[in-house]
Amino acid sequence: MAEHDAVIVGSGINSLACAALLARAGWDVCVLEREAELGGAIKTAELTEPGYVHDVFSAWHPLWVGGPAHAELAEELAARGLEYLNTEQPTATAFPDGSSAFLSTRGDANAEEHGAAWTAAMSEVGANAELVFGVLGTELWSRSGASLAVTAYRRLGRRGLAAFGGEVVQSSRDWLTTTFASERTHGLLAPWVLHTGLGPDAATSGFMNRVIAFAIEAGGMPVPRGGGARLVDALARLVEDNGGSFRTDADVERVLVADGRATGVRTTTGDVLTARRAVICNVTPTQLYGRLLDIGGDLAAAGRRFRFGRSEMQIHYALSEPPRWNGDERLGKSAVVHLTPGLDGVSRAVNEAERGLLPAEATVVVGQPLTMDESRAPGGAGLLWIQLQELPWQVKGDAARELDVGDGTWTESLRERYADRIQQRIAHHIPNLEPAVRKRVVLSPADLQSANINLERGDPYSGSLALDQNFLWRPFAQQPGHRTPVRGLFQIGASTWPGPGLGGGSGTLVARDLLKRRIPASGPLFRSLRSRR
């Protein structure tokens, strides 16, 4: 039997951030991972052909680089080989008619492209940066959360606070159409709410649109040289250098509880690890209350009813040459390009997916990591990272009425035929795509679930972000926050506040709680932009 101060179940970014902060403070931490590699949804592999280095799932690190854990750990991670690369041209949207829209890290360029409304909108976010990023960086069900509310009331007043609350729940559609006259600007920003698990007509999507636009202008679209696994490696070495440890191929089947307190875990092989101070589980509520904890009652039933959101597909391309885009040359220099007809196109695809249909014209996320990191492919070659965030888990039909979906499960045939449709969409914008393809690898929602237990139903965000499972109510209303009904047992990960994204937010919040000390609520990128406004 091994004994530690803290045992952490799962090794995703939140687990690694939490482990690093605790280990640096002198805690004996052990992280258990059921798969053969650490990192959770951060996985780097030569997935297609030798020499082509793909980030298989998550790929972009603005939330991490701009967040609190990185602000504290950056120097130590750099000393362990982590190097971030960035670009002044982080994102764009390419429209079917050949036009495009761009977002730069230069505020003057964005103002020139999107008008005075852009400057006004970003200035408004900057003026409230402490409150906006305080919400995202605070344990809402805590004294810190109450203190943030009091500070906001004193600063904004009753009417101002009410107005801010209204802005938080506003939809992306309402914010975009009342703020910007240009439909191109709408089409540039609307797809980004998909990266938060929302659609443009969902409550709070307008708030997230503001935050994302502000963050991208401030921090760009950083990636680690050599792939996301370099971040995992650096964090793991930091933990080990401070006395922590890791076990892979260690599947936890039970959290052990005595007298109402978590005392450790047991793996499927019968190994028992005891925890003197805390057990921290980076899992979904369905796992925590349906498998790991032996409790019953209404709370357990509510945890098992936790809802998951839309499913996702990933497509990876190894190309013999770089993609040559039609239209504006800046498309080939942009880290992330969305393909969509615009705001209404995103809404339509989301609606079709939520009704169980394969979207006729899905929003296609085209990632181009070689715009920053040329080491990820052989010289003169190309590499694309494709993400589709508007898919159903159980397919009822095809909105385009082209594909036979069979019994509605994600078979290999359905996966490849749908990927063919997406490839045709991409080739409309990149005419040399199909002649340049050396190999294509497609991961369906079923493949994602098989690869990572937290990607249940192929949901990359580990749970619906509908308002009743978001903000104060995440993961769910009966047990919000990171503490659980079992003393010494904490839940972290994308299923918990502040939700999904490669930022390490929930792991940082729990480490802060356990260490009873403050870690900066937002990173230097946000603070530096606010100081310029």
Image (cartoon, rainbow, N blue to C red):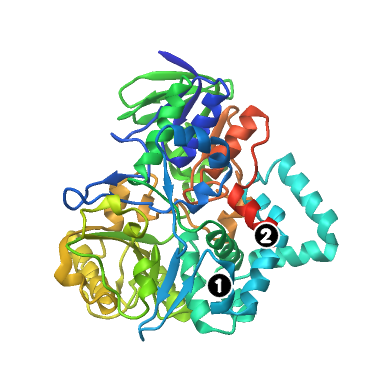
Judge from the rendering whether residue 381 lies leftward or rightward of residue 116; answer left or right.
left
Q: Earlier in the sequence, mark 1 or mark 2?
A: 1
Which quadrant is the C terminus positioned in? bottom right
In the picture shown, does residue 438 fall above or below 46?
A: below
* Structural crowding at the residue carrying mark 2, measured as other residues with C-alpha within 10 Å and reported as few (<14), some (14–19) or many (≥20): few
Which residue is denoted by mark 1 in the rendering?
110
Specify whether residue 359 is in view: yes
In the picture shown, does residue 437 fall above or below 276?
A: below
Query: Which numbered tag is attached to residue 532?
Result: 2
Query: Picture quarter containing residue 253?
Result: top left
Judge from the rendering whether residue 522 lies leftward or rightward of residue 460; answer left or right.
right
Q: Position of residue 525 (x, y in %)?
A: 58, 52
Q: Which kind of residue does numbered mark 2 sit on?
A: Arg
Q: Which kind of residue does numbered mark 1 sit on?
A: Asn
Which quadrant is the N terminus positioned in? top left
| Alpha carbon separation for disc pair 1 and 2 | 15 Å
Q: Where is residue 257 in the image (x, y as percent from the top left)?
A: 52, 23
Depth check, front residue: 101 or 458: 101
Q: Position of residue 165 (x, y in %)?
A: 72, 63
Secondary structure state at the residue bearing disc 2: helix
Secondary structure state at the residue bearing disc 1: helix
Judge from the rendering whether residue 426 lies leftward or rightward of residue 3; answer left or right.
left
